Image: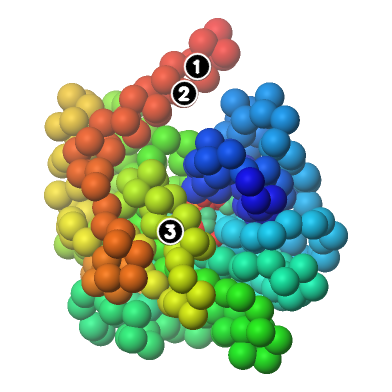
Amino acid sequence: MKKILVTGGAGFIGSHLCERLLNEGNEVICADNFFTGSKKNILHLLDNRYFEVIRHDIIKSMLVEVEEIYNLACPASPVHYQYNAIKTIKTNVLGTINMLGLAKRLKARFLQASTSEVYGDPREHPQKETYWGNVNPVGIRSCYDEGKRAAETLTMDYHRQNNVDIKIIRIFNTYGPRMAANDGRVVSNFIVQALKGEDLTVYGDGCQTRAFCYVSDLVDGTVRMMNSKEGFIGPVNLGNPVETPIIEFAHKIINMTGSSSKIVYKPLPQDDPVQRKPDISLAKRELEWSPVVELEEGLKKTIEYFEKSLTFVKKACL
Ligand code: NAD
Ligand code: UDP
């Protein structure tokens, strides 16, 4: 049994990670400021005596005793991370410094959740970890993209300068139950719109691509990375390499939900990457990891989740 801190543990990915770590018999502390996370995501874990929740903002320092730190705290949806851009970059810079400082003091292993956004609007396709990226440093996405790039730099520098035991993962678009219905990301937007019979909002011409990874696969890769051999620090891409144009994805959601919704086209947000698909050969080789959940299977579970939560909201409003 290990004592583990998960920052952002009440969020979408963080709550699945806490659950997995508890199921494996660990003691888990979840630290979250509940900006985009919710108590609902972790309600089912509260009875577990090895689970502890602390309302904490990582831009402030934190004193706990743990052996491992998964640093996930940061809003991930463009709508949410742009809502308070300065706070987003503070979370990535000051927050990551605080968590790295904690890891240094405790001699704890530290895993930084980075993102495919460090590749920006990539000129290399698919993206390998060796690609340095094409990021606009002054655009509306840069609070997140540059924030995460700075977080990677800080993580590497604490390793080089202070010998902190680190791991870096670059997460590609991940989806599944417990995504927030209002978080503005394409998977939740399209499913909620389809279930409500509203128009599906495709930004731009819908030819831009993304590759979607189901959350249990992502969590498995994350835990494998934390437990990987000393000396393998990454960064390593974690994502599902099956690439889908957004317009095709919209049609898939309409078909799978049996919805009568139509598709409407809206302006493409500034700096929206044209294509994205991970090269996961490094994860396959070093972690013996590759995703196993196919898109249709993962979407089915996600649609069921949103169906249930929308019915619950409807009943609560009656
Ligand atoms: P999420 O928004 O659901 O979860 C983020 C969690 O962090 C929330 O619970 C939020 O309340 C908490 N948080 C935010 N700022 C905080 C702060 N200053 N102090 C403490 N807690 C704070 O997002 P997610 O999809 O679960 O993403 C989790 C992590 O994975 C993030 O670091 C994100 O950048 C990374 N990531 C996610 C994806 C994806 O597709 N979901 C892709 C790439 C990277
Ligand atoms: N998108 C869309 N309609 C929506 C939400 C998003 O067409 O309602 C597009 C968005 O422009 C992007 C892709 O879907 O090209 C993925 O967007 P998301 O916000 O999920 O994640 P990103 O990969 O851009 O961070």
Q: Position of residue 99 (x, y in %)?
A: 71, 68
Callout 1 secondary element: helix
Q: Do tag 1 and tag 2 residues touch (Cβ < 8 Å)?
A: yes
Q: Residue furthest bottom?
A: 161
Give the label, 3 or 1, closer to the camera. Answer: 3
Nearest the camera: 23 or 271? 23
Nearest the camera: 142 or 40? 40
Q: Position of residue 29 (x, y in %)?
A: 71, 46
Neighbour class for label 3 at 10 Å: few (<14), some, many (≥20)? some
Decide if residue 47 is in sight here.
yes
Q: Find disc 1 in the rendering and name its residue.
A: 312
At x 35%, y 49%, the residue is: 217
Identity, as a three-letter code, of the amino acid under mark 1: Phe
Callout 2 secondary element: helix
At x 44%, y 83%, the residue is: 136
Q: Find disc 3 in the rendering and name its residue.
A: 224
Identity, as a three-letter code, of the amino acid under mark 2: Ser
103 lies above or below 306: below
At x 69%, y 37%, the residue is: 51
At x 22%, y 36%, the residue is: 297
Identity, as a three-letter code, of the amino acid under mark 3: Arg
Q: Do tag 3 and tag 1 residues touch (Cβ < 8 Å)?
A: no
